[in-house]
Image (cartoon, rainbow, N blue to C red):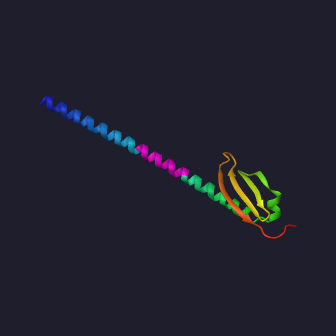
């Protein structure tokens, strides 16, 4: 009887160890998922703000775009405007800190400039 109770105790301890390892893995998985969701939300907010700013830039007339040719700091962004042809402007919006390109577009401004 004594020998049997020792084996049962060992089995219970082993089962608790398995449950503890599984619980720790589940906790690590949920923490990683929460971190991924948080990063995704931050990225989405950053892209929405950048898109709103680029939408504003897309409304600028050719004269304003010409005045801002090149790379310039614009708040928390770096705005890069290039003119590959007389009627086209390439506009890129970079993150001000990391200089990673967030958005890029091409704007068409027909007609002669004054």
Most distant residue in the right direction: 114
Give the left or right position of residue 37, taking residue 3 as reference: right
Most distant residue in the front direction: 85
Most distant residue in the bottom direction: 111
Most distant residue in the left direction: 1
Q: Quadrant of the N terminus?
A: top left
Q: Main secondary structure of the magenta part?
A: helix
Q: Hey, which quadrant is residue 45 in on the image?
A: bottom right
**Residue 105, how many percent across, how many down?**
68, 61
Q: Hey, which quadrant is residue 86 in on the image?
A: bottom right
Give the left or right position of residue 68, taking residue 40 as reference: right
Q: Residue at x 29, y 38 (%)?
A: 16
> Against 97, is 64 above or below?
below
Q: Which residues are magenta?
A: 27-39
Q: Quadrant of the C terminus?
A: bottom right
**Residue 98, how many percent across, how many down?**
66, 45
Q: Residue at x 70, y 62 (%)?
A: 106
Question: As rendered, which of 56 and 104 lies closer to the eye?
Answer: 104
Tally the numbered discs: 0
**Residue 65, how many percent across, how many down?**
79, 60
**Residue 58, how many percent across, how many down?**
73, 64
Question: As rendered, which of 2 and 22 lies closer to the eye?
Answer: 22
Q: Residue at x 34, y 42 (%)?
A: 22
> Against 107, is 27 above or below?
above
Give the left or right position of residue 55, taking residue 26 as reference: right
Question: As rendered, which of 81 and 37 lies closer to the eye?
Answer: 81
Q: Residue at x 51, y 52 (%)?
A: 37
Whether 97 is among the magenta residues is no
Give the left or right position of residue 1, taking residue 63 as reference: left
């Amino acid at each position: 009887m004594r020998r049997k109770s020792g084996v049962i105790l060992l089995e219970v301890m082993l089962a608790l160890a398995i449950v503890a390892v599984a619980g720790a893995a589940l906790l690590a998985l949920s923490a990683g998922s929460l971190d991924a969701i948080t990063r995704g939300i931050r990225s989405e907010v950053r892209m929405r703000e950048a898109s709103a700013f680029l939408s504003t830039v897309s409304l600028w007339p050719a004269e304003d775009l010409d005045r801002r040719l090149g790379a310039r700091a614009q708040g928390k962004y770096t705005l890069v405007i290039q003119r590959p042809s007389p009627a086209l402007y390439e506009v890129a919006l970079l993150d001000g800190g990391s200089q990673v390109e967030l958005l890029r577009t091409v704007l068409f401004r027909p007609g002669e400039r004054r």
